[in-house]
Amino acid sequence: MRLTRVLTALATLMPGLASAQSAPLWRNVDISRQLRDTLPQRIRVQYAAGRVDVRGTSDPVLYSMHLRYDEARSVPLHRHDADQRSTSLGLESRGGGLRNSSSSASGELRLTLPRSVPLDLDLEFGGTQSTLDLGEMSLQSLRLDCGATDAMLLFSRPNRVRMRDLEVNVGAVDFTARQLANANADQIRVRGGVGSVDLDFSGSWTHDLSVTTRLLLGKLTLHIPPDVGVRVEVQRVAASFEHSGLVKRDDAWYSPNYESAPFKLKVRAETLFGGIEIQHSSR
């Protein structure tokens, strides 16, 4: 009888204990590192779920990071290798790596990075709502990997250096990029799974640009200034193609001003199911 009473009491307590263990333990922390010089750096950021804000700063810091996180499941990540000139930032699960949890959607990452330092920047996000204003930075390369996310990438001012490569890989997503000409990139690659991808090529044009896009299922929209010449190669299966003003020549579509335009945008767009739309907009 005594054993029965003990087992009954444990059974009564277990739901409460499980609930207590699963309840998030929120903590806020601010972490920064002083900027020692302006030599090139490689920075990698990983964050599973929640709100994300990344932007440049003129303050003398290599990074300044604010985190709101569930300390029962995650730990802050801030590793710096001075010899390799590389830094890893964000959150990692207590089991290691990047992992979503139901509670982490209320988390937050606010990160500022130096505008004066040439950066190779690698961003890896899970299920986030992300706002990334990378204007007036010195990005040599940018790689953005997103899972199930709502993301805005903005270059509000021209990138200070020539960017070798801008690569975006998104999953189930609503992804918008604005003023992409300000990225000062040689080439842009965007790969998407399911959702909406909206790319705006306004900004300060300084050279021709090549863009490759691939979207499995959804809508791809390209906004192009009227004085930029456009050449579009399209591969599609069950997808529409809206291209008002473009003329077909051989295996591509051209804007009427392609030959005379001071700058040219060459696009290779592929989608299986969905649609591709080319819109001419003001700068």
Image (spheres, grey):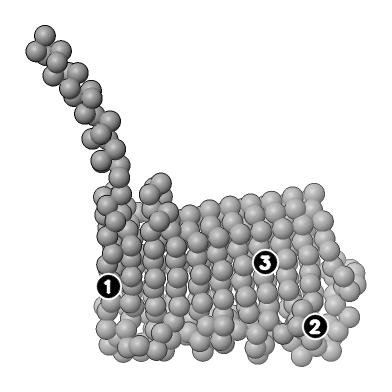
Left/right of residue 77 with respect to residue 138 in the rendered view = left
Q: Residue at x 61, y 71 (%)?
A: 177
The kind of residue tagged 2 is Pro
Number of the front mark, 1 or 2: 1
- The numbered mark, 1 or 2, whose residue comes first in the sequence reads 1
Q: Where, quadrant-wise, is the C terminus in this rendering? A: bottom right
Image location (x, y in percent) of residue 123: 45, 66
Identify which residue, 152 or 80, lies in the foreground.
152
Tag 3 residue: 198
CA gap, disc 3 to disc 2?
A: 17 Å
Q: Where, quadrant-wise, is the N terminus in this rendering? A: top left
Decide if residue 57 is in sight here.
yes
The residue lying furthest to the top in this view is 1
The kind of residue tagged 3 is Asp
Tag 2 residue: 226
Q: Can you say whether 192 is above or below 188 in the image? A: above
SS at badge 1:
strand
The residue lying furthest to the left in this view is 2
Tag 1 residue: 31
- The numbered mark, 1 or 3, whose residue comes first in the sequence reads 1
Q: Can you say whether 31 is above or below 174 in the image? A: below
Q: Residue at x 23, y 35 (%)?
A: 17
Check if mark 3's residue and mark 2's residue have beta carbons within 8 Å.
no
Image location (x, y in percent) of residue 70: 30, 54
Image location (x, y in percent) of residue 172: 58, 52
Q: Can you say whether 224 is above or below 107 in the image? A: below
Left/right of residue 15 with respect to residue 265 in the rendered view = left
Q: How many marks?
A: 3
Identify which residue, 74 or 143, lies in the foreground.
74
